[in-house]
Image: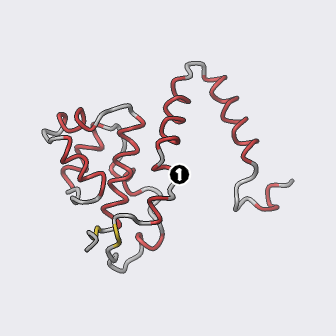
């Protein structure tokens, strides 16, 4: 039988992993900072363990983000008032989330290693122009 996990816990865990990885911090180093093993950090990141409020606050301090960061970009169906249902650990939403891919994390880390802010901005503008308009930008931007 497939293990079921709460989708909110999975979202919070994926945001924890995202921020930790963007900072170049290992699971072991984050665990040491909060007196946990790297295996316990893995369980948080996979959504197998729920992150309590005090632990979430610790993570936000160590990872230099507000606690709300862990809930940013939460899908509307999870953010609603109805209690979330459980989903399989191989959730399509997480498998296809570009923020959870290693390539994305490596790209962002490399981007922030560019020390010259002008070069970083030019690269950012280049990538935006190559990517094309945002899906919801529509004709309103054509002024």
Q: In this rendered view, identify the residue nearer to me: 107 or 63.
A: 107
Q: What residue lies at 70% left-to-right and 29% top-to-bottom?
A: 122
Q: Dot 1: what SS?
A: helix
The residue furthest front is 1
**Residue most toward the right?**
143
On the picture, is 19 further left or further right than 129?
left
Counting every numbered tag in the picture gives 1
Q: Is residue 119 above or below residue 57?
A: above
Where residue 95 appears, x then y in whole percent? 46, 58
Residue visible at 38% across and 64% down? 90
User: In the rendered view, does 3 fall on the left or right side of 140?
Assistant: left
Query: Which residue shows up at 15% across the image and 41% down it?
Result: 37
Residue 63 position, x and y percent, is 32, 38
Q: Which residue is mark 1?
A: 98
Residue 102: % across, % down = 46, 42
Which of the 4 quarters of the picture holds residue 139?
bottom right
The answer to which quarter of the image holds residue 7 is bottom left
Which residue lies most toward the left here?
A: 35
Q: Quadrant of the N terminus?
A: bottom left
Q: Is residue 28 left or right of residue 17?
A: left
């Amino acid at each position: 039988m497939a293990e079921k996990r709460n989708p909110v816990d999975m979202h919070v865990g994926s945001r924890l992993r995202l921020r930790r990885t963007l900072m170049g911090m290992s699971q072991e180093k984050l665990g040491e900072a909060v007196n946990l093993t790297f295996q316990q950090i893995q369980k948080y990141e996979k959504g197998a363990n729920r992150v309590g409020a005090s632990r979430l606050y610790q993570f936000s301090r160590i990872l230099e983000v507000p606690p709300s960061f862990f809930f940013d970009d939460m899908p509307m169906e999870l953010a609603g008032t109805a209690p979330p249902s459980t989903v399989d650990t191989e959730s399509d939403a997480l498998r296809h989330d570009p923020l959870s891919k290693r390539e994305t994390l490596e790209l962002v880390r490399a981007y922030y290693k560019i020390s010259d802010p002008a070069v970083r901005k030019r690269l950012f503008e280049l990538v935006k122009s190559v990517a094309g308009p945002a899906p919801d930008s529509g004709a309103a931007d054509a002024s």
